[in-house]
Image (tube, rainbow, N blue to C red):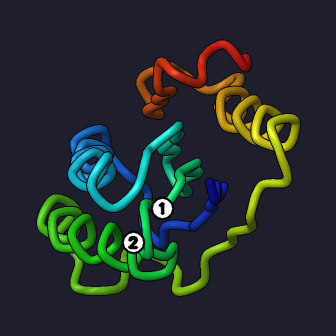
């Protein structure tokens, strides 16, 4: 299938409670509009590895994630401004080696940070690639 690693930056630093809103948004449509393979939510950016299901495409998926999490994050950090940068970086995977490389990048991205400053998820069905 079509698999995409995505990166997008936040314009605010996420406290622990706000990371939870991003996680909820990611899991909400998992197995409905996309298969969620992995993510890391860092204090100021997010990396996601997913495969859209059927005719779903990446841009509407990410727009929905950003819309939902923005509303919740704004309440938590008391801001009216933008929470996410507009741009997002995505590209299609070129096979299992490419997928495994991006998965390892996501898992290793928070190296050196305190464990309570990020959220990491790797789906069971792709853990064998690590």
Please indicate whether residue 79 sits to the left or right of residue 94 in the image: left
| Residue at left offset 83%, top offset 45% | 95
Q: Residue 102: x and y, percent?
A: 76, 42
Residue shown at the point (59%, 51%) measured from the top left = 47
Give me the C-alpha separation between circle 2 and circle 1.
8 Å
Query: What element does badge 2 sit on?
Result: helix
Looking at the image, is 104 positioned above or below residue 17? Answer: above
Residue tagged 2: 61
Instruction: Point out residue 116 in the picture as x, y percentages from the top left corner.
Output: 41, 24
Specify the quadrant of the image occupied by residue 108.
Answer: top right
Viewer-nearest of discs 2 and 1: 1
**Disc on res. 35:** none
Q: At which x and y percent is residue 118?
A: 47, 34
Examine the rendered structure and indicate whether residue 81 appears above or below residue 10.
below
Q: Position of residue 36 (x, y in %)?
A: 44, 44
Q: How many tags in the picture?
A: 2
Residue to which mark 1 is pinned: 52
Residue at x-position 64% and y-position 59%: 2
Label 2 vs 1, first from the N-terminus:
1
Q: Secondary structure at mark 1?
A: strand
């Amino acid at each position: 299938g079509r698999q995409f690693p995505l990166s997008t930056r936040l314009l605010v630093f996420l406290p622990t409670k706000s990371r939870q809103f991003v996680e909820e948004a990611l899991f909400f449509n998992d197995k409905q509009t996309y298969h969620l393979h992995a993510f890391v939510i860092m204090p100021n950016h997010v990396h996601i590895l997913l495969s859209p299901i059927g005719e779903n495409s990446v841009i509407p998926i990410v727009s929905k994630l950003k819309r939902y999490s923005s509303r919740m994050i704004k309440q938590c950090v008391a801001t009216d401004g933008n929470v996410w940068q507009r741009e997002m970086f995505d590209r299609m995977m070129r096979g299992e080696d490419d997928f495994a490389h991006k998965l390892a990048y996501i898992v290793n991205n928070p190296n050196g940070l305190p464990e309570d400053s990020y959220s990491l998820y790797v789906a069971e069905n792709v853990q064998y690639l690590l």
